[in-house]
Amino acid sequence: MAKTAERIVRRERIRKRLRPTVKGSAEKPRLSVFRSNRQIYAQLIDDQSGQTLASCSSRIKEITSQPLSKTDVGREVGKKLAEIAKEKGIEMVVFDRGGYLYHGRVKALAEGAREGGLKF
């Protein structure tokens, strides 16, 4: 198996192991992270109703217009998502790193969300 395929399988295994313990609700939604090679995406999800309450990504104009490193982009996405969540009255979340290591862009996104006022 190729190295990339092994990483994908490993990440899926971690996600399936974490998913039963990390659940979101309307009061405390799940902050889900997806990271591709170039972009990073974050969503606030209510697992009970199966709805996305808020989302943000590195593809929005406010972030793409600035020359930032990928880690700094992750931090900005976290701050923007926290701002959107505050407008909707969400303050507490459950962090779902999506099987990625809590390091680099994922960690920066979490720190940016905390700086923006989200608690988890």
Image: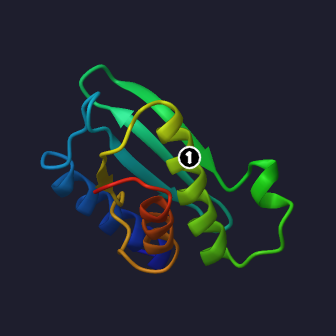
Farthest residue to the right: give it: 65
Instruction: Please say if 49 is above or below 87.
Output: above
Q: Residue at x 83, y 74 (%)?
A: 67
| Residues packed near mark 1 inside 10 Å, few (<14), some (14 to 19) or many (20 plus) | some
Could you tell me residue 62's position as x and y percent? Answer: 79, 53
- Say left or right for 62 vs 55: right
| On screen, residue 38 above or below 83 | below
Q: Is residue 73 left or right of residue 26?
A: right
Coordinates of residue 79 in the picture (x, y in percent): 56, 58
- What residue is shown at x 47% (from left), y 65% (from top)? 115
Q: Quadrant of residue 38?
A: bottom right
* Res 76 quadrant in image: bottom right
Residue type at mark 1: give it.
Glu
Please state which of residues 81 and 96 is positioned toward the viewer in this rendering: 81
Q: Residue at x 59, y 62 (%)?
A: 36
In the picture, the quarter occupied by the C terminus is bottom left
Q: Is residue 58 left or right of residue 96?
A: right
Residue on which the image places disc 1: 83
**Residue at point 43%, 73% (across, down):** 107
> Splitting the image into 4 quarters, where does residue 68 fall?
bottom right
Identify the image quadrant of the N terminus: bottom left
Does residue 68 sit above or below 46 in this rendering?
below
When the figure is inspected, residue 16 is found, relative to residue 91, above or below; the finding is below
